Amino acid sequence: MRQGFVKVAAVTPDIRVADVEYNTKQICAALDEAAQERAKIVVFPELCVTGYTCGDLFSQDVLLHAAECAVKKIAAYTKEKDMLVFIGTPLQADGKLYNTAAAVNRGKILGFTTKTFLPNYAEFYEMRQFAPGPEVCREILFDGESVPFGPQILFQARSIDNLIVAAEICEDVWSPIPPSIESALEGATVIVNCSASDETIGKDVYRRELIQGQSARLIAGYIYANAGEGESTTDLVFGGHSIIAENGSILKEAKRFCNQAIYSEIDVQRVVRERRQNTTFRMRGERNLVRVPFDLNIEKTELTRRCSKYPFVPPNELLRANRCEEILTIQAMGLKKRLAHTHASSAVVGISGGLDSTLALIVTARAFDLLGLDKKNIHAVTMPCFGTTDRTYQNACKMSVQLGATLREVPIAEAVNVHFRDIGHDPEEHSVTYENAQARERTQVLMDIANGMGGMVIGTGDLSELALGWATYNGDHMSMYGVNASIPKTLVRYLVKHAADTTEDEALKEVLYDVLDTPVSPELLPPKDGDIAQKTEDLVGPYELHDFFLYYLLRFGYEPSKIYRLAKQTFAGEYDGDTILKWLKTFCRRFFTQQFKRSCLPDGPKVGTVALSPRGDWRMPSDACMTVWMQDLEQIEE
């Protein structure tokens, strides 16, 4: 549970209808397995102590008495187990029978959450046996002890900040206003659901979307444990379709028609941070709900949930293609509006033969198509200098022609050498001055060409470069509209690939594929034997790592040590811990020291949830100290 991760389980045990003793043994056996897996919150299905499909047997005192004894026995069985457990059971109270979820912890029964909405339609007729739960929680006597009884009881961990758990039962989440809404508004970060939802055609899709959507709406973890094989098949079949979700993402989903336990880790820290950031999620000022404390030991949770290596890139091929098309459209629509608003008759793009300028040119061509403008008014300017290789030069020229732009070549070596003479710099000294002078000369050329033809310079820099400050201030850092400003480097590659995959121009396809195969480089140092001498990732680190760091730092506000932990797991076998830590320190250091470049960014369209615009997404003082972030990294224990 360090860093907010809490191991949870949704368990569908083998049961027999009305065989309480057998069911109790199965539940206890499942608790043993959950304890071995070190699960801290364990959820069982609705009425699993007796079976959901007992029908009018629920009117039999012998069954109800057996269920009460079973709850006591299961509670006692948890005495030496470090977990909070929810068990579906019928319960008599005040002359009525209720459908409840019993919460137990370390041998103690903490309370009974009652079902609020009883389905009484189609195949369901719960109101024949059960009464709806009371509107508010009250105390009842159970086994000689006074325990909370009612809806929306909040079970709060003493030792873990913000771990507050509430339960609802099956139909409750299908209702127009589920009880979990009020629970979440009073602080519940994890919702559990003891359920018995039968299988009909297509119902699994609706169920999945329902749980996924509820976890998103509440910005919470959601553990849904569903009844499975063992329930009566007189009229229905139950598939054991259990789900663990977190804030709109499915963490784990059970295979249907196969009783099993599923495990994952809910990140309570992330839930709280998301709620804090979301101004429409408003916690209630006063506390109306009953809170019951429970105990858990604090320990390191072994993670089974997996992070994507490329969090900005959808893993599904079809989804990725659709997403790429949508992003290219957003970029082009942003540029279209800016061109129309400024009455710009042309656009100027500096073309290097690299990924970023290729994407910018593709987007510009799309914007011109949307405006019905002649793409000959796109001026693709190649500016060869000391580090330009024949490969990138040829690719820049070919793609410009194939996209219908006007190719213009402006060699800048002579102008840069004159500048070196003017400022007294030795051209043989390949320092930062040597590199930045080239970048600033190129920007000056582009700006002046744009001025001369009433056009605008289209920026090529991407989100990853902005995060690292990997741009020359007032050089490639500057433009009149930056179409790539919120596109991370790992995504740029897929956008160019999508353009290559979908074009019918074979010559364009060929050159785009070659651009994809070209090492990322600013090409500011002379080539070695005709090949690129300066590879960005050798200097600043792998972009796949930096994009991973960037995503979890900005999207979820994770501390560096937590990002390190996730990266070490995600990139196991590719990068060792020392390598990840080295580049994470580089990322944090550059992210803080290079904010001044982001504070004066040109306009550009936002396309995803992570962006660095100083106007809309990231407002950070340029002189903020990195001390606590670096201290967090220094304290990492392997």
Image (cartoon, helix red, strand yellow):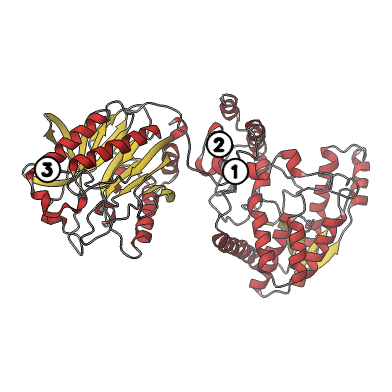
Q: Measured along the vertical axis of the image, is residue 171 above or below residue 584?
A: below
Query: For the residue labelled by badge 2, is the local secondary structure a helix, a strand or a loop?
Result: helix
- Callout 1: few (<14), some (14-19), or many (20+) C-alpha neighbours within 10 Å? many
Q: Nearer the viewer, residue 251 or 399?
A: 251
Q: Earlier in the sequence, mark 3 or mark 1?
A: 3
How far across and how far down the image is residue 154, in percent? 27, 37
Q: Which residue is mark 1?
A: 548
Q: Nearer the viewer, residue 424 or 628?
A: 628
Kind of residue at disc 1: Phe
Kind of residue at disc 2: Ile
Query: For the residue labelled by badge 3, is the local secondary structure a helix, a strand or a loop?
Result: helix
Kind of residue at disc 3: Leu
For the C terminus, the image quarter is top right
Rounded to the nearest whole Å, what is the CA distance between mark 3 and mark 1?
53 Å
- Please tell me the numbered disc located at residue 64: 3
Q: Earlier in the sequence, mark 3 or mark 2?
A: 3
Asked if the residue under mark 2 is in contact with the one under mark 1, i.e. CB atoms within 8 Å, the reply is yes
Query: For the residue labelled by badge 1, is the local secondary structure a helix, a strand or a loop?
Result: helix
Q: Measured along the vertical axis of the image, is residue 186 above or below residue 502?
A: above
